[in-house]
Image (spheres, rainbow, N blue to C red):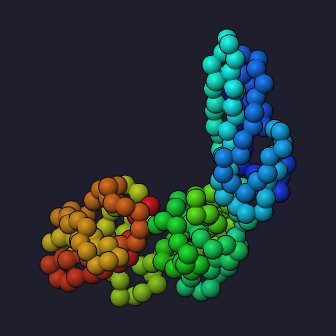
Amino acid sequence: MTISPITDKSPGASFDISATASSGLPLIYKLVSGNASLSGKRLTLGSVPGKVQIEVIQLGDSRYAAASAQTGFCIVPSTPVLTDNGSQVVASGGTLYQFFVNGNPVGGYTSNSTFRKDFDGTYSVKSVTQDGCMSVSSNVITFNRVLANEDPSVKIILSPNPVTDVLSVKIPEGEALEGLEIIDSAGGGRMTSKTLSTRVSHLPAGVYVLKVKTDRDTYSAKMVKL
């Protein structure tokens, strides 16, 4: 038994489910879950975003055993709007969000509609349902100032930032590194290093504080792990 894949749909869409059975026996179509109604093989979606699950059943006869198959798709939420609020971007048009920096998700789903612009790059957001269906991406806001230039007291440079794999740290000329520590948002130390090039790919996505101790001073800066 085969059910043709169903792409994600907008609320209110109406379409026929396409399924076949090699036995040639009649098929029964069943709505398992989701905001939709089913008449025969005609599925009409409601207005509530989220996952929809469909089951197709072959009852069987003297020659063929009963069989069934399921498929699912999303009723996508409406596309949110992202606005620039100085030090933050603000999402509207949803209740649960996933923020992105440079096209990569940062952190998990959140009901907080604001996100700090701590790093260079592009910011966007998607609305998310409780069961994981995502909207189309919002408009994009670009932030052009690097973090190190926002605060004259910051004398170290992190590259790249946001980072996915290897983080490089540049310290003031003439100073020698004694060690660095990466601290998570809860204040817990996640890792230490004695080199200016450190692999961080194992760290969960999120915002961290990097503390760098040299033979002359101690510095800190924010780091985003994608």
Which quadrant of the rendered structure holds the N terminus?
Answer: top right
Label total for image:
0
Farthest top residue in view:
63
Residue sitting at 23 percent across and 65 percent down? 191
What percent of the width, then of the height, locates residue 25? 76, 20
Which quadrant of the rendered structure holds the C terminus?
Answer: bottom left
The vertical placement of 110 against 168, above or below, is below
Visible residue check, residue 73: no
Give the camera-side residue of 53 and 156.
53
Horizontal side, residue 168 vs residue 54: left or right: left
Residue sitting at 56 percent across and 75 percent down? 111
Farthest front residue in view:
62
What percent of the width, then of the height, locates residue 204? 37, 61
Residue sitting at 68 percent across and 54 percent down? 34
Horizontal side, residue 178 vs residue 54: left or right: left
Visible residue check, residue 140: yes
The vertical placement of 172 against 190, above or below, is below
Horizontal side, residue 44 vs residue 118: left or right: right
Give the camera-side residue of 120 and 108.
108
What percent of the width, then of the height, locates residue 117? 53, 78
Residue sitting at 79 percent across and 59 percent down? 46
Give the camera-side residue of 69 and 93.
69
The part of the image, by quadrant, that contains residue 143 is bottom right
Give the camera-side residue of 101 and 5.
5
